[in-house]
Amino acid sequence: MPAQSSPHALRPNTPPSTPLQALLELTGATTRTPVPAEVRVTGIEQRSNAVRPGDLFAGLPGATSHGARFAADAVARGAVAVYTDAAGADLIGAVSVPVLVREDPRAVLGELSAEIYGHPSDRLRIVGITGTSGKTTTSYLVEAGLVAAGLSTGLIGTIETRIGGQRVPSALTTPEAPQLHAMFAAMVEQGVQAVVMEVSSHALALGRVDGVRFAVGAFTNLSQDHLDFHKDFEDYFAAKRRLFEPDSPIAARTSVICVDDEWGRRLAADLVDPITVSTTDAADDHPAASVAPTAGPGSGAVDRTADPVTEPVVGPAAWRVVGEVKATGGEQEFTAGGPTGELTVRLRLPGRYNVANALLAVATCAAAGVDPAVAAPALATVDVPGRMQRVERGQDFLAVVDYAHKPAAVESVVATLRAHLTEAGRGRLVVVVGAGGDRDAAKRPLMGAAAARGADLVIVTDDNPRTEDPAAIRAAVVAGAHELPATDRGEVREIGDRAAAIAAALAWARSGDVVLVAGKGHEAGQEIQGVKHPFDDREVLAAELDSLLAQHSPHTDSEDLTVS
């Protein structure tokens, strides 16, 4: 590994000091030389360029290279020992520090990291939120509710990590176990009492959250995503279940499950006394005679051709929407009914799916020990970067950026904006959308179909092509859109350059229309052939709007919809 500056790492200023001998016993590892009694460990790292003096360096096997190759660099930076497998030990050769060898070293990496940092999650109220869509929005809503109750909070997620007001961009939705437990220790040191974190399926499957003691686990929903990593929907679902299953070492003490979809109902039926949430009383609408979800690889739908399976019965939801949802100009209000009675919830976020996110957030705050009547009002203050975020430059049509990059998410956002047009009684919808490279290819045509089904115009463009041919990705998205009959879809165009696609959408828009730029949301870069180029949909959209308005005087009959 070439020498470089140490990547930013959040660590406690005064970490515990643990005898290496105790860690040897904890892991069940062996050594080829005796472990000196005086060797103590104060941190753990698997990135050699982030190693600090006193660290245990975890040289782990990777997809393309073995981390043990960088052990010499780690030792030069102050690592007091190396933790690896037999293959790694052979690669290391002779070094001046003890080498701990264990088959499948990742299997106990989480517990090892927790031990080194003094099991900090035991001293925090950890709320983990998982699901396909809604994790980020629900996390922000829950955090607002906890803050309203006077708790000092931390937030770990897709957009950022926040610790006592310090904001750090997140490279992963859920950090690797060594970094995660170091963050928790830093939070404890800074007086944080509760942490809200997104928990991805990758993190659950790869053990990134092993060793964490979750107070509350919340489930949003499950739909097409990550089938490039998971072999099928069952494998994807199984990863999510790790946060809730009673026999899982990371099972949350309390589970809060949204049962609006079949996967949520299935999960809730398998748990003991979960707290359930529903915006539709879905449990009552799906009797035991209905068919359980048995979707196969690459499918976002329930396989109705399989043998009928009795779906587990889930009783009435503990938390539900009472009466109608009132939606006005992008804001929403509804009544939440729960074990403590009814209360009003207001949101600055549009869309029925955000009603589900908000209801789940209220129930999750309650499960975390916060009075729902205290938490609920705080939800009205929440804006989420890149989630239905309005870009306003004085134009007389609505321009929105959203992170929707999965078929179900695109469908939901498009439906929400179409509902706004229906409410306004006029206007057309244009959607700029693409799909990422080196990711689940099966969802690409589904993305195109989801956009085309509800839009008057779809402009298929590049998202993050990564190492793939951008034209091939676009072709798959376009093909999905064209699979719909012409009578059931809008016009479809293809413009590879994303900035040009955004400009074309704005040029097409008229007074009262809606422009949606979907897929990247808060992201500030576009990855092409291993290079991340600066590109923020919000900034590009604003610049193109400025250019457009400089050429044409704006109309005066402006539509007002606050989405940001």
Image: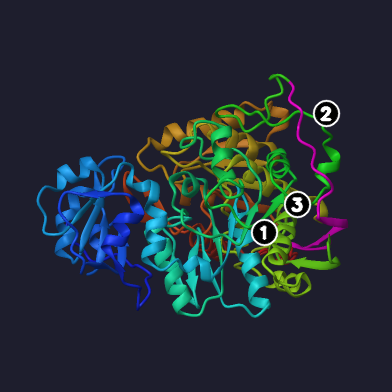
- The disc labelled 2 sits on which kind of residue? Ala
- Residue toward you, 455 or 122: 122
Q: Spatial distance from mark 2 to mark 3, Cα to Cα?
A: 20 Å
From the viewer's perspective, tell me whether residue 286 is left or right of residue 402: right
- Residue 193: numbered disc: none
| Mark earlier in primary sequence (3, 1) | 3
Is 182 placed above or below 110 here?
A: below
* Res. 400 visible in picture: yes
> Which structural element holds mark 2?
loop
The crowd level at tag 3 (other Cα within 10 Å; few <14, some 14-19, many 20+) is: many
Q: Identify residue for label 2.
A: 289
Where does the image place residue 185, in percent across and percent down from the top left? 43, 71
Q: Identify residue for label 1.
A: 398
At x 26%, y 44%, the residue is 85
- Residue toward you, 99 or 293: 99
Q: Spatial distance from mark 2 to mark 1, Cα to Cα?
A: 44 Å
Q: Quadrant of the C terminus?
A: bottom right
Is 338 placed above or below 466 here?
A: below
From the viewer's perspective, tell me whether residue 525 is left or right of residue 263: left
At x 53%, y 63%, the residue is 542
Asked if residue 320 lies in the magenta stretch, the reply is: yes
The crowd level at tag 1 (other Cα within 10 Å; few <14, some 14-19, many 20+) is: many
- Residue 276: numbered disc: 3
Where does the image place residue 501, in percent across and percent down from the top left? 51, 47
- The disc labelled 1 sits on which kind of residue? Leu
> Which structural element holds mark 3?
strand
Looking at the rendering, the stretch of residues picked out in magenta corresponds to 308-336
Q: Are marks 3 and 1 in contact (CB under 8 Å)?
A: no
| Mark earlier in primary sequence (2, 1) | 2
At x 60%, y 29%, the residue is 299
- The disc labelled 3 sits on which kind of residue? Thr
> Which structural element holds mark 1?
strand
